Image (tube, coloured by chain):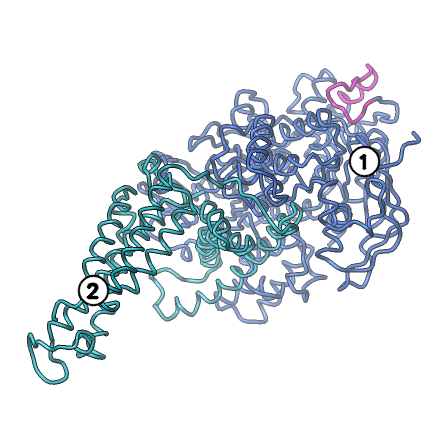
Amino acid sequence: MNKQPIIQFSDVSFQYQNQDAATLQHINLAIQKGEKVFITGPSGSGKSTLGNLINGVIPEEFSGRLTGRVTISGQPKSKLDLTDLSFVVGTVLQDPDAQFVGLTVAEDIAFALENDAKPDDVLHQKVAKWAQRLNLTTLLKKHPQDLSGGQKQRVSLAGVLVDDEPILLLDEPLANLDPAAGRDSMKLLNWLAAQQDLTVIIIDHRIEEVLQIPIDRMIVLADGRVVADETPDHILKQDLLLKHGLREPLYVTALKNAGVNVKQINHLSNLETLKLSQINRDRLVQWAAQQDNLVKKSSRLPIISLKKLTFGYPSEPTIFKDFSLTINQGEMVALVGKNGTGKTTLINLITGFLTPAGGRLYLGKNDASGDSVKQRADRIGYVLQDPNQMISKTMIYDEVALGLELRGIDSETTKKRVFETLKITGLYPYRNWPISALSFGQKKRVTIAAALVLRPEILILDEPTAGQDLAHYSQMMAFLEKLNRQRDTTVIMVTHDMNLMMAYADRTIVLDQGQILADASPAEVLTNSAVIEKAHLSQLSLQVLAKKAGLADPIGFAEKFISAERRHLDDESANLV
Amino acid sequence: MNQQISYDVGKSQENRWVTRLTGMTKILVLLSLSIIGMVSYDTWYLIVLTVFAVLFYQSAHLKWHQVRGLLYAIAAFTALNLILVYLFNPAYGSQVYGSSHILIGRGFFALTWEELFYLLNMLLKYVFIVPLILAFLFTTNPSELAAGMSRIGFPYKISYAVELSLRYIPDVIRDFKQISLAQQARGLEMSKKAGLWNRLKRSTQILIPLVFSSMDKIEITTRAMKLRRFGTKQRRTWYMTQKLGKIDYLVLVSTGLLIAVGIGLFWVDGGRFYNPFK
């Protein structure tokens, strides 16, 4: 094509003012009008920085040294400020709650137009049009904060699309969405891109999820450089993603492990249309036959018992009514369900953050219903979803040591245990860093370290793998598993990550509007299509692949693959430590 | 999410005429009546204002539990205020009204009819302003307020700042609670099981995460606002701007008349005070 690219980077490097190395180095790339481009890379690879260069947040908010030439919509970026760029690039930020400015959905959609001083009738007309297009009409008077994850995303989209910008930039659009909402959201983007003739740029590290829609090009960044700029098919055929600590779609890894020559497979990035030859099907069947079956443990002593718990937020309908649940010692439990269905509420009832209107809670044999948060904390380690709500020290070491100090542990032991934990969580090299210099994923790891260091009997983690690289993810999970095996620590994970659940949980509890919809092994849950649909979960790509290969037991195949993969990653992380 | 404070107008208020008033009208009425009410000490006039304010309050149809806390606080404050005014200068009423009819006691603390009448006037000022404020507080959301402020001439950046600060109060309160709990979950005893002093000392530990998480949010919100061109133009429009309706004109005209009467009374009374002792 001879067209002028809508975005062009020529030999672009950028170094933040307060850092000693350049975050982006010699970037060359061209994005054509109407393309759907997926920018990915491990955390710290510079992918957010690249996005900030495109929408003008750099240099408006972060100063630094920019060399090379950036052209956007035919104009050199040096001539465009944030305001000029905002007419060309619409940005949807990662944190949906903080980016809502309007009190109601309608006001938030209208915000940019209000700032352009558009007359009242234009405001109302455009808001109505976009609300209808994104199916938000009935929600116009609601507070954006009260919506579900998927609805929030649609509000953010409407808020930037009212401007009719040609380019849409999304920073981690899949963060905080349940699997079904994530899939809907990607489909919506695909539809919008076609409808509005948009150029779409998606920045994310969830490769399998983003590739649910056709992507024209994938740009992989590592250490500030472009390491690949090709079609997804091309990239998946190589081993490039794993090499850079990124997770490739699991079905692709499975094909490779089974010895299938993926180079010969057409449309590798589209699982739905992917065709397997007889030879390849046989390879998958053979591979599965060679694997051992997963050994599951069965448990015994109850450690958390909820008896007829009743709870509702003030002036809202009751969520839990006579809710009973027993979790046994040494179990690894995944608590799943759609956004806003009461998972975090349930955890908050266990940790004492919320007080139930009725019912009792037992920890082991003791009635802990009257215990304070602190008393329960002596047995339960709880890592909240948002690390910013937990971190109270400015240095990493101090933060991790805090719990031990509060419990009066001597400084020698404290030091030993803190160092040990920092090593396991991959934070040891940063131990003397200020926490403010860390990314979200790193902060999350600090809070997990702060809980691990106390060696609690029960560990509750809300979205433990949010923002984590593959390497850190498997390292941390391997450690949790070790704790679980060796010390019989009970682990409860609240998660939207089906792969995590499948790989590490012994038991899955599916929550739906305050009821237990299913309580079974992950495999059983993932083969129950009614539960999957109702709780907004999703099947694994491995199951789809196994069906294509004609395997009789797709979930068994998934189980085998995941346990083999885990052994492999465990070995790798053992080498890392 | 569980929000303790909400700026939603309750169901029972939706169709009330106070709710239908535009933000601009409400601000104008509140500001102008407060000023005239604070200046004037004409008892009859203050009683008329009180009746006017009670009409607003009636229309707002507030539930006792909504206003209970505020009312108790204001009542306590008012009582304290009146007592202090009396204690500091018990003869002030006599100075104002130029006569002295002792009701009870003698010497410095002698209570005169004049002082009592003066205090009654002060009490009336509170009595009239409180229902007015309550009615507006519970029927105006921050957006309407900002749109109204901007319409009567406040710079829009200030109006928006007011709106945002009001908006984020519930968020900050929620964050504070959550952070406090998170700290307890790390082993910091903050419940009644620790002493009061310890609890106070430990609550400082919550401030750091509260500041950090608020700063983080402010940074993102500011970025989101800039990315959608906030502050780039001299002028800004408001989605929530409402057209003035009949009821607005009616209320604005009545308010105008009331103020004219209030000013007229300065001549009739020969000053700010109505003096029944002459």
Query: Eyeballing the image, is B142 above or below A256?
Result: below
In the displayed structure, does residue A257 sit left or right of residue A296?
right
The chain holding disc 2 is B
The chain holding disc 1 is A
Chain letter, colour cyan in render: B
The residues tagged by marks 2 and 1 sit, at their Cα atoms, a distance apart of 76 Å
Question: Looking at this rendering, what residue extends furthest in the bottom direction?
Answer: B107
User: Is A406 included in the stretch rendered in magenta?
Assistant: no
Q: Position of residue A484 (x, y in %)?
A: 57, 46
Q: Residue at x 68, y 35 (%)?
A: A563
Residue on which disc 2 sits: B121
Q: Which residues are magenta?
A: A267-286
User: Is A274 included in the stretch rendered in magenta?
Assistant: yes
Q: Residue at x 83, y 29 (%)?
A: A233
Numbered badge on residue A218: 1
Give amino acid for label 1: Met
